[in-house]
Image: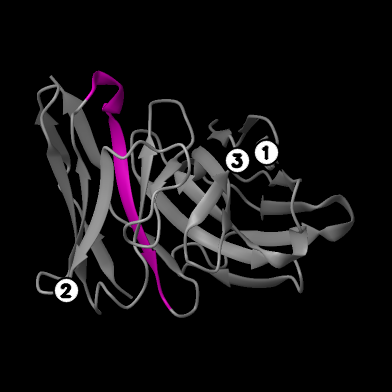
Amino acid sequence: EVPLVQSGAEVKKPGESLKISCKASGYRFTSYWIAWVRQMPGKGLEWMGLIYPGDSETRYSPSFEGHVTMSVDKSISTVFLQWSSLRASDSGIYFCARFTRAGNFDYWGQGTLTTVST
Amino acid sequence: NFVLTQPRSLSESPGKTLTISCSRNGGSIASHNVQWYQQRPGRSPTPIIYEDDQRPSGVPDRFSGSIDSSSNSASLTISGLKTEDEADYYCQSYDDNNHAVFGGGTKVTVL
């Protein structure tokens, strides 16, 4: 059973806002960091940051800090990634992944394809 | 922070052995665990090596990982190559603040 299930594909216009989700199940949600990873079309994996559901602590990559916000709702075991003003360059696939104490991503969501275009 | 550098692409014949390098620029490769992920087209990455040389359950022992402090790099070796091994492979490590870094990825072609 895959413990991370992400929200569906999105199509947005530049300047619009967006919030995508990643729902966890099957483990103690508050005990593991959850990271977000971007993959632009035809490109590699980029670490965006992570959030610790236990206390909502966040750590962002300098490349994404200030442009995205990570949040959590412990009552539904879900983490969120949101933008207040999308750019065309935000198009890509966004994965959530569980980050372990050993420093690896042991479970990944299925990805959310986000298209930002006029 | 640090950078992980991988070759962009490698190719080899079925049955042969292929090694992907992951060179760390900035800090010691041994300072934090190195992981490897396989990503097939249209799929999420899946872990194939964690903690430098450990295989998750279900990953064939044809896949092995190692680190070399003298060259400050990590390696993923795939022996007995199969056509199903065609995929992109990424190395990954992290720092003391849990900031993760991925290598640029290596596209493996099994001719």
Quarter holding the C terminus of chain B? Answer: top left
- Position of residue B22 relative to residue B81, above or below, is below
Task: Tell me the subunit letter for badge 2.
Answer: B
Residue type at mark 3: give it: Gly
Q: Which residue is drawn at 74% across and 53% down?
A: A27
Q: Does the magenta stretch include residue B91?
A: yes
In the rendered structure, the answer to whether residue B100 lies left or right of residue B53 reads right
Q: How far apart are marks 2 and 1 (CA)?
A: 38 Å
Q: Which residue is drawn at 28% across and 28% down?
A: B85
Please name whichever residue, A23 or B55, is drawn nearer the observer in this view of the structure.
B55
Report the mark closest to the observer, 3 or 2.
Answer: 2
Q: Does the magenta stretch include residue A102?
A: no
Q: Residue at x 58, y 41 (%)?
A: A14
Quarter holding the N terminus of chain B? Answer: bottom left
Per the image, the residue denoted by label 3 is: A109
Q: Marks 3 and 1: in contact by CB < 8 Å?
A: yes
Pointer 3 and pointer 2 on the same chain: no
Tell me which segment is drawn in magenta: B82-95
Q: How far apart are marks 1 and 3 (CA)?
A: 6 Å
- Position of residue B24 relative to residue A87, above or below, is below
Please name whichever residue, A24 or B65, is drawn nearer the observer in this view of the structure.
B65
Per the image, the residue denoted by label 1 is: A6
Per the image, the residue denoted by label 2 is: B69
- In the picture, residue B23 is in which quadrant? bottom left
